[in-house]
Amino acid sequence: MKIRCIPYKTKKIVNIHKHVDGWFWEKYSAHPYIGCQYGCEYCYWRDEKYNMLAREKDARDLEDPFSQYIKIKVNAPELLRKELSRLPKEIIYTGDYQPVEAKFNLSREMLKVCLDLGFPVLINEKSPFVLKDLDLIKDISEKSWACVLWSISNHTSEGYSDIFEPNLPSIESRFKTMKKIAEAGVLTGTAFMPILPFITDSDDNLEAIVKKTAEFGGRFVLAGSLTMSGAQATRYMQIITRHCPEVAKKYRALYNRGYIPKCEYTGGIGEKVKKLCEKQGISDRMPRYIPPGKTAVNKKVAERLLNETYYMELRCENKYRILAYRKASWGVDEIDKDIKQLYYEKGLEGLKTIPGVGSKLSLRIEEELLRL
């Protein structure tokens, strides 16, 4: 496949999220490449709001600009050092081990920056190529925190890789690399996402992924359904109609022009994965890195509240109640005061001064504080 690499200098490298993510716990993200040679057909990065490459003049003759036209941020490491040096130490989602990394080595240089500055790192990977930087990842883990997530969606569906992940390293190679990461003492687990409705959501496949994760040293499995948006949704539905026409109509009913499947579907999948994880002695949530300091208790309480919000979503509870929990979680996570000290000094009234926290949620936070 013809690959066109375009080196350039970017003006900014770190994306700062408004609120911490309740799945991966990252506050920042920074990636050295735009586009991906692996070109998975379901990838949300194909959506126009993420992928502008198809509009590039010198990409128009390519069959798939997303996987064949790769922009290289050659100044990423030096920009990362400059920008991170001004930010609080929270998790940064970085690393990109597609084939161009062998030539440009930017992911490794960015990890060196994170190690030097003491930033905890999350890497979400599909390639054993990440092992080239295991020395750095292990050093980061020992100095602060590191986690290597493995994106794995299938283990039992025949023909899956040929249709949806034709350019990716095998699923078995990912599990074997997971084991090496775990043996090095680095936190690892499976990002079981996207789960493709009617394709990789069978009970057999759910159980196989969870069991394999536990067997190969993973400590958790995060289950997430396929999102559908813009150009990504259009391309994916073309693939489904071509290869799995019998399920195309089911997708239209399941999504009903929405971004995610109906709650009853996602909730059912999540509950199944939760029970399977319990059976294997692992978690269905990713443990959060808690930085030392006066807000450590805040981060721990916010983690518990955000996990509770996730389980409320699985049960399809009232969306306004879920939003209230989420806003309170953000308030707890972001306040620059020790909420335990605030509680000891002013009781429930002190907790009510936290943004998003009212009478009911102050009682809920009190419960968590008394447990710590």
Image: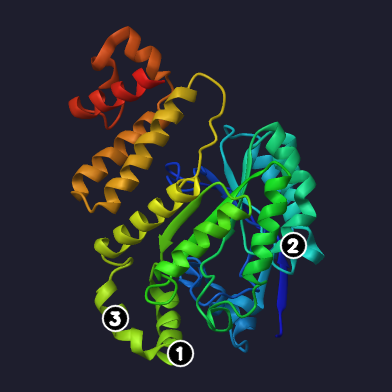
Is disc 2 placed on a helix, strand or loop? helix
Which amino acid type is shown beneath numbered disc 3?
Lys
- Of residues 311 and 320, the one nearer the viewer is 311
Which amino acid type is shown beneath numbered disc 2?
Phe
Quadrant where the image shows the N terminus: bottom right
Residue 279: x, y in percent?
45, 50
Q: Residue furthest front?
A: 279
Q: Residue at x 24, y 16 (%)?
A: 348
Measure how far apart labels 1 and 3 are at the Cα level.
14 Å
Name the residue carrying label 3: 250
Q: Contact (CB < 8 A) between labels 1 and 3?
A: no
- Of residues 195 and 296, the one nearer the viewer is 195
Which comes before the other along the chain, label 2 or label 3? 2
Question: Neighbour class for label 3 at 10 Å: few (<14), some, many (≥20)?
Answer: few
Name the residue carrying label 1: 243
Q: Is residue 287 left or right of residue 134?
A: left
Which comes before the other along the chain, label 1 or label 2? 2
Name the residue carrying label 2: 129
Measure how far apart labels 1 and 2 are at the Cα level.
30 Å
Which comes before the other along the chain, label 1 or label 3? 1
Is disc 3 placed on a helix, strand or loop? helix
